[in-house]
Image: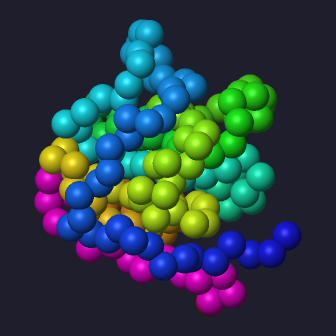
Amino acid sequence: MLPLLLAALSLSAGDPAPPLRALEILRAPTGAGVVRQLPQNTPMVVEFWASWCGPCVEAIPRWNTLAQKFEGRLQFIAVSAEDPETVAEFLAKRPMAGWVALDVDGTVHSAYGVETVPRTFLVDAHGVVRGVTTLSALRDMDLEALAASRAIALQVPKQPGEG
């Protein structure tokens, strides 16, 4: 498998985040009940991932830890462009915390400028992108800042092959 390269993104910090309305909710957090759409007006960590992506799969334990640590303060939303059966089978073996949603037609991936995965967007409660990174480069202090509506100074994710 070739390494995934970080592509130029059309969204960056300060841009309005496209709505996540076109997503199909596959799994909601415990206690969310029957839902048809994601919560609004709350800070979010939006992770674009795929079951076939090695770095995405390796990051799931960290994702789960962060989602539990920031439960009630941040919404964690994992978005895949794969088919529902593939994702459901994968999640049966490797559960993910937070929301899991499907972008089966690729509309949301396109709106966010996502060409490769993994890709992580930090979106504030007003719907503004506050950072674009990868889960592996994300620090707890970045999420603390997002939850508190403070400025975020993200580290630049390393490109594959960089030391």
Tell me residue 152's x, y (percent): 24, 67
Q: Quadrant of the N terminus?
A: bottom right
Q: Does residue 14 sit above or below 108 in this rendering?
A: below
120 shown above or below 79: below
Position of residue 84 relative to residue 117, above or below, is above
Residue 81 visible, this angle: yes
Residue 101 at x, y = what percent? 53, 34
Q: Is residue 18 left or right of residue 93?
A: left
66 left or right, relative to 13: right
Q: Main secondary structure of the magenta part?
A: loop
Task: Name the residue nearer the viewer: 140 or 154.
Answer: 154
Query: Would you say residue 134 sits in the magenta stretch?
Result: no
Q: Looking at the image, how many numbered discs can be counted on the residues?
A: 0
The region drawn magenta spans: 145-162
Residue 29, how many percent across, how many down? 46, 23
Horizontal side, residue 16 vs residue 106: left or right: left
Which residue is located at x 42 percent, y 56 percent?
111
Task: Name the residue nearer the viewer: 96 or 115.
Answer: 115
Q: Is residue 80 visible?
A: no
Q: Position of residue 151 (x, y in %)?
A: 17, 66
Q: Quadrant of the C terminus?
A: bottom right
- At 54% from the left edge and 81% from the top edge, which residue is drawn? 158
> Which residue is rendered at x = 44% and y = 73% of the image?
9
Residue in the image at 44% along x and 36% along y: 22
